[in-house]
Image: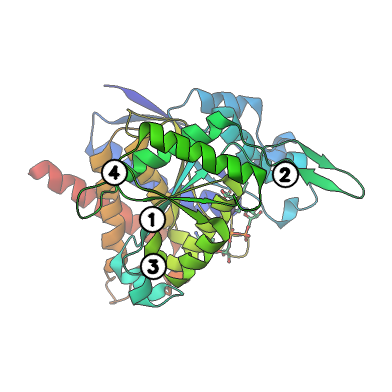
């Protein structure tokens, strides 16, 4: 049997708290499927790495990432590192990791992972209930990675795109649209969100995106939506954007946090930064929540582990080629959130209006996952 290599980078604040919960479900999978073997190694990233090595990520950890099949990443940053220069900030650890692995597309789905969460949305239930879009965020270009200057009186970030960067991201958007078929079985719509009305890089983004779709995916409907107006639609009528939102690094960062308002909490939104086109065999990837290290709640056992657990499900699907187990883990999350404990209380953390601890939620998901894996075995 093939042994899969996983690198775990817990990071800072709630990062280690939620990583511990996700690993419980991975252990369950190993116990229930003897031919599923994972070799886990650990590394430092973010503030935890800075404190030990003066770097937010070391070459050793980057090399370990390069030789792994997947990386499960917690979250980084916090007020204790606010004074650190930008070039070595905790957040730079994540950016270096994305760049070194060339994890060029960040997949960020927005949907309800359990129907009982609809009443947690900041928006009206009937506006959000059928929401189902995936933000595909370009992850290794744009303003994040262009040349930077930082002087006394001015600073700049070069917002630059090369043709190949837009093309490969468009191929990920198209591949996901094919997996999200509409009622008539045709691929989902791809919404191209840019600022072609203002930015030169935005006009280029639009031209290159249309070229790729005309050449390679002429059966997929591609529609342009300016990024600012996409932000408005996400709040006013998010289901209009159902499908794939293909967008630049900066816009994708912002739009995917709006998703947190749609589903009620950032604590349930997973992501995958992939190094290839999903569906064309296993891809290497970095799996992390959309949210940050939540220093305001760390150390209290209050953090919601669902985003990290659902990121593990994406890992199983894209990097470990175990899509059925990925589905079952998502089902275990759904069952956990839709069920009640012995006192009739909902099993959910404070951000979702509950009073369960991080550990209770993680334990319940892991035991539901075990039940589901056994059930499938029996059939
Ligand atoms: P944040 O996402 O950490 O937190 C925003 C709000 O959401 C906070 O009130 C927080 O308590 C809440 N929240 C987030 N995740 C939660 C969870 N799992 N359960 C319950 N509540 C949750 O954003 P921020 O406060 O602006 O940033 C904090 C730090 O995280 C900063 O240093 C930032 O740079 C960093 N950051 C890291 C990542 C990452 O590691 N992937 C992503 C975003 C921000
Ligand atoms: C995210 C985060 C990161 C980003 C930071 C921590 C580098 O906000 O993953 O959304 O801006 O990409
Ligand atoms: Mn972000």
Tell me the SS state at disc 4: helix
Find out if the beta carbon at label 2 lies less than 8 Å from the nearest ligand 1 atom: yes
The image shows residue 68 at horizontal and vertical percentages of: 46, 26
In the foreground, 129 or 3 = 129
Distance between the Cα atoms at labels 1 and 2? Answer: 32 Å
Asked if labels 3 and 4 touch by Cβ distance under 8 angstroms, the answer is: no
Distance between the Cα atoms at labels 4 and 2? Answer: 37 Å
Q: Which mark lies nearer to you, 4 or 2? A: 4
Find out if the beta carbon at label 3 lies less than 8 Å from the nearest ligand 1 atom: no
Q: Earlier in the sequence, mark 4 or mark 3?
A: 4
* Residue under the point 35% across and 38% down: 175
Within-10-Å neighbours for mark 3: few <14, some 14–19, many 20+: many
* Residue under the point 26% across and 49% down: 181
Q: Earlier in the sequence, mark 3 or mark 1?
A: 1
Q: Which mark is residue 241?
A: none
Tell me the SS state at disc 2: loop
Against 185, residue 128 (above or below) is below
Q: Which mark is residue 179?
A: 4
Write down the residue under mark 3.
Answer: 348
Distance between the Cα atoms at labels 3 and 1? Answer: 24 Å
Q: Which mark lies nearer to you, 3 or 2? A: 2
Distance between the Cα atoms at labels 4 and 3? Answer: 30 Å
Within-10-Å neighbours for mark 4: few <14, some 14–19, many 20+: some
* Residue under the point 41% across and 42% down: 173
Q: Earlier in the sequence, mark 1 or mark 2?
A: 2
Q: Which mark is residue 133?
A: 1
């Amino acid at each position: 049997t093939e042994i899969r290599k996983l690198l775990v980078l817990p990071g800072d604040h709630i990062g280690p708290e939620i990583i511990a919960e996700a690993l419980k479900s991975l252990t369950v999978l190993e116990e229930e499927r003897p031919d599923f073997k994972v070799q886990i190694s650990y590394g430092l990233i973010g503030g935890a790495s800075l404190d030990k090595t003066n770097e937010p990520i070391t070459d050793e950890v980057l090399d370990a990432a390069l030789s792994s099949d997947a990386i499960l990443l917690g979250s980084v940053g916090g007020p204790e590192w606010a004074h650190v220069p930008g070039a070595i900030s905790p957040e730079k650890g994540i950016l270096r990791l994305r760049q070194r692995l060339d994890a060029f597309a960040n997949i960020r789905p927005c949907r309800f992972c359990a129907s009982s969460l609809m009443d947690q949305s900041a928006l009206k239930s009937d506006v959000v209930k059928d929401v189902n879009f995936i933000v595909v965020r370009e992850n290794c270009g744009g303003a994040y990675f262009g040349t930077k200057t930082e002087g006394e009186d001015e600073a700049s970030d070069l917002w630059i795109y090369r043709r190949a960067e837009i093309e490969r991201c468009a191929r990920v958007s198209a591949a996901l649209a094919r997996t999200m078929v509409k009622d008539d079985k045709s691929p989902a719509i791809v919404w191209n969100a840019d600022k072609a009305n203002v930015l030169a890089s935005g006009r280029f983004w639009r031209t290159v995106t249309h070229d790729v779709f005309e050449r390679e995916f002429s059966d997929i409907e591609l529609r342009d939506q300016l990024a600012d107006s996409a932000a408005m639609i996400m709040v006013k009528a998010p289901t209009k954007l159902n499908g794939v939102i293909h967008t630049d690094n900066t816009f994708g960062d912002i739009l995917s946090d709006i998703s947190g308002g749609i589903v009620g909490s950032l604590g349930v939104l997973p992501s995958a930064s992939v190094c290839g086109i999903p569906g064309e065999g296993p891809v290497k990837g970095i799996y992390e929540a959309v949210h940050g290290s939540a220093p305001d709640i760390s150390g209290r056992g209050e953090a919601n582990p669902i985003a990290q657990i659902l990121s593990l499900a994406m890992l199983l699907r894209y990097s470990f080629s175990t899509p059925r187990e990925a589905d079952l883990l998502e089902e275990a999350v759904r069952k956990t959130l839709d069920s009640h404990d012995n006192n009739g209380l909902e099993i959910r953390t404070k951000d979702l209006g509950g009073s369960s601890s991080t550990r209770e939620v993680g334990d319940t998901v892991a035991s539901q996952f075990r039940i589901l894996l056994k059930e499938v075995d029996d059939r």
